[in-house]
Amino acid sequence: LILSRIADKIIAVDINENAVKSTQENISKNKIKNIEVRKSNLFENVPETFDLIVFNPPFMSLKPSSGIETALTDYHHKTLKKFFSEVKKHLNMGGKIILDFSNMGDEKLLEKLILKNKMNKKILHSTKIKDFAGVDTKIYVLELSIRIGVITYRLKIILFLNINASHLILG
């Protein structure tokens, strides 16, 4: 919701129908006019390019045993690899990617994908929390960029939803 205040247009996508519906309800409830919600597996139904791409990937390489687990698990990191293979085609010159990750994921693979795609990385935020099992977990937010450029104040943004994080957009 905060991004809607600074962006001309936001496209929010998720592969999960429940996340799409929940987001549409929140947008309607909060009377937001500049967010469009689509059901999409990453960029599958998104031909546009963007100034800012926000991605909250599932970071554990486990096979999900339920629909809700798809928000946290990414078997063989297929989603993360697919995102990095497609993201450059959807990022405007000088655009940025905001990505959150955790030490519960494969940090070496993430670094490899960042280097392979010739991206600059900047840690915007890092914190430690206790996970559901009481284990210390580091969560961090990265800013990735491909080219040096200027981002204007008239932003066009794509936001990848996450069904476990959908409560964050409630008004």
Image (cartoon, helix red, strand yellow):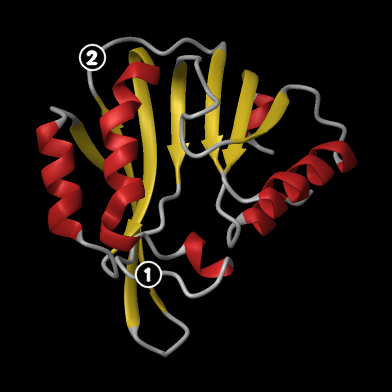
Please report contact status of discs 2 and 1: CB closer than 8 Å, yes or no: no
Q: Position of residue 137 (x, y in %)?
A: 33, 75
**87 relative to 15 in the view: left or right:** left
Residue sitting nearer the eye, 39 or 1: 39
**Residue 124 visible in the picture:** no
In this rendering, the answer to whether 76 lies above or below 100 is below
Looking at the rendered structure, the kind of residue marked 1 is Lys
Q: Secondary structure at mark 2?
A: loop
Residue sitting nearer the eye, 54 or 171: 54
> Disc 2 to disc 1, how far (Cα)?
37 Å
Say the numbered circle drawn on residue 170.
none
**Residue 121 visible in the picture:** yes
In this rendering, the answer to whether 95 lies above or below 18 is above
Residue at x-position 44% and y-position 70%? 64
Q: Position of residue 54 (x, y in %)?
A: 46, 37
Residue at x-position 83% and y-position 45%? 25
Residue at x-position 37% and y-position 69%? 63
- Image quarter (top left, top right, bottom left or bottom right) of the N terminus: top right
Q: Position of residue 123 (x, y in %)?
A: 27, 46
**3 relative to 137 in the view: left or right:** right
In this rendering, the answer to whether 122 lies above or below 108 is above
Q: Position of residue 169 (x, y in %)?
A: 69, 48
Return the residue at label 2. 148
Say the numbered circle drawn on residue 63.
1
Mark closer to the observer (2, 1): 1
Mark 2 Cα-neighbour bin, 10 Å: few <14, some 14–19, many ≥20: few
Residue sitting nearer the eye, 24 or 168: 24
Looking at the rendered structure, the kind of residue marked 2 is Ile
Q: Earlier in the sequence, mark 2 or mark 1?
A: 1
